[in-house]
Image (spheres, helix red, strand yellow):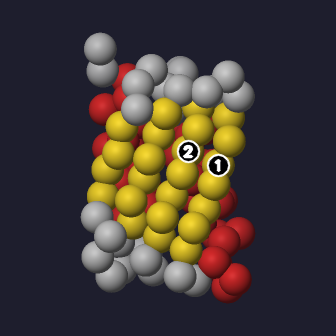
């Protein structure tokens, strides 16, 4: 799957995150987080797992995290991916 359009999902409230997706020629993942030093590797693992499940091969993924738990990361990314597949 390719990301077809620019979309976003989520909020900037505490314990949540914003996911921004846009078309790109290759797959890139950028993570900004209040807990980046401690948890970037776990956030990235969760993002990569969801992208693999959706078979995403290209696109720019940017996540701005405010301490979201795993289920929130997955849900926000899935919502954004479904929006990016429309139209």
Residue 27 position in % (x across, y down) = 68, 34
Whether residue 21 appears in this view of the structure is: yes
User: Which image quadrant is residue 79 in?
Assistant: top left
Could you classify mark 2 by the number of other residues whose Cα lies within 10 Å: few (under 14), some (14-19), or many (20 or more)?
many
SS of the residue at dot 1?
Answer: strand
Mark found first going from the N terminus, 1 or 2: 1
Q: Which residue bears the numbered disc 1?
A: 29
Q: Which residue bears the numbered disc 2?
A: 61
Query: What residue sits 42% from the left and 53% below the top?
Result: 19
Do tag 1 and tag 2 residues touch (Cβ < 8 Å)? Answer: yes
Could you classify mark 1 by the number of other residues whose Cα lies within 10 Å: few (under 14), some (14-19), or many (20 or more)?
few
Query: What residue sits 71% from the left and 69% below the top?
Result: 41
In the picture shown, does residue 39 fall above or below 32?
Answer: below
Residue 45 position in % (x across, y down) = 65, 59
Residue 11 position in % (x across, y down) = 28, 64
In the picture shown, does residue 34 fall above or below 17?
Answer: below
In the picture shown, does residue 11 fall above or below 53?
Answer: below
Residue 82 position in % (x across, y down) = 34, 33
């Amino acid at each position: 799957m390719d990301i077809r359009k620019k979309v976003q999902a989520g909020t900037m409230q505490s314990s949540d995150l914003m996911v921004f997706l846009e078309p790109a020629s290759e797959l890139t993942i950028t993570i900004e987080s209040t807990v980046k030093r401690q948890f970037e590797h776990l956030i990235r693992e969760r993002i990569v797992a969801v992208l693999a499940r959706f078979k995403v091969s290209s696109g720019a993924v940017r996540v701005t995290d405010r301490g979201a738990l795993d289920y929130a990361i997955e849900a926000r990314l899935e919502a954004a991916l479904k929006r990016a597949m429309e139209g």
